[in-house]
Image (cartoon, coloured by chain):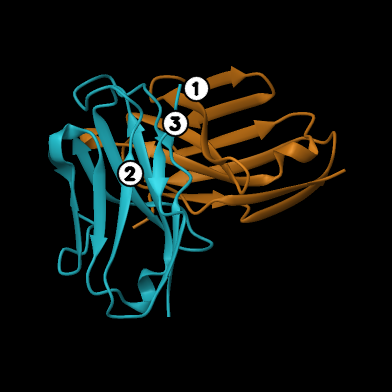
Chain colours: A orange, B cyan
Amino acid sequence: SQQGEEDPQALSIQEGENATMNCSYKTSINNLQWYRQNSGRGLVHLILIRSNEREKHSGRLRVTLDTSKKSSSLLITASRAADTASYFCAGRGGYQKVTFGTGTKLQVIP
Amino acid sequence: EAGVAQSPRYKIIEKRQSVAFWCNPISGHATLYWYQQILGQGPKLLIQFQNNGVVDDSQLPKDRFSAERLKGVDSTLKIQPAKLEDSAVYLCASRLRSFRGDGTYEQYFGPGTRLTVT
């Protein structure tokens, strides 16, 4: 079963705009990770946020985590055409098991 | 640094046939994962190895799927016999830290094997 549910399922924006994706998960996690997947580079780890952290930044990425609501968001600022991909959240629970969500498909239009 | 290698990249078989996938993780990575990703869905963990021992295979359909990691390095995933619903991309990933670590090390994914069962 999928741990997380991403919202929206698909998102289309213009280059330069910001993109926000949300993830809700079901069970307790030790940390939550975001991955990007495109046909060119496969599945790539973007950023990890621990359960005791509320916000984390990495370049144009900003991740928030609300453990009380079991939700996370990924913000990509100043989007580029190269950001076009599917984005997955993945929660790490007991025994280091990682469970992926269903993904948000982002299209950035040049 | 070489990444996770998988072969073959593509495979087409008929239902009820057998198929095997191979994965070579990044050197030194103790943890190895096999995922199944059906089109339009996120990856689903099939099995997790720590060195050559199985940590989690709760979602592996054991009546038809098997996996091994002899000597704690390469791994093979086998399906016998295949069904139409096994059509998916099979991803292998590896991770540096042992599962008793603090879990901060990311997983590195291979390019995957796209299986089509007709």
Q: Chain of mark 3?
A: B
Q: Position of residue A47 (x, y in %)?
A: 52, 26
Kind of residue at badge 2: Cys
How far apart marks 3 and 2 lie (CA) works out to 11 Å
User: On screen, B49 above or below A65?
Assistant: below
Q: Chain of mark 1?
A: A
Q: Which residue is mark 1?
A: A54
Q: Residue at x 60, y 19 (%)?
A: A57
Left-right relation of A5 to B33: right
Q: Are marks 3 and 1 in contact (CB under 8 Å)?
A: no
Single out the residue that lies furthest toward the front.
Answer: B8
Front label number (3 vs 1): 3
Q: Which residue is mark 3?
A: B3
How far apart marks 1 and 2 lie (CA) works out to 36 Å
Q: Position of residue B57 (x, y in %)?
A: 18, 51
Kind of residue at badge 3: Gly
Number of residues whose C-alpha sits closer than 10 Å to that of mark 2, classed few (under 14), some (14–19) or many (20 or more): many
Q: Which residue is mark 2?
A: B23
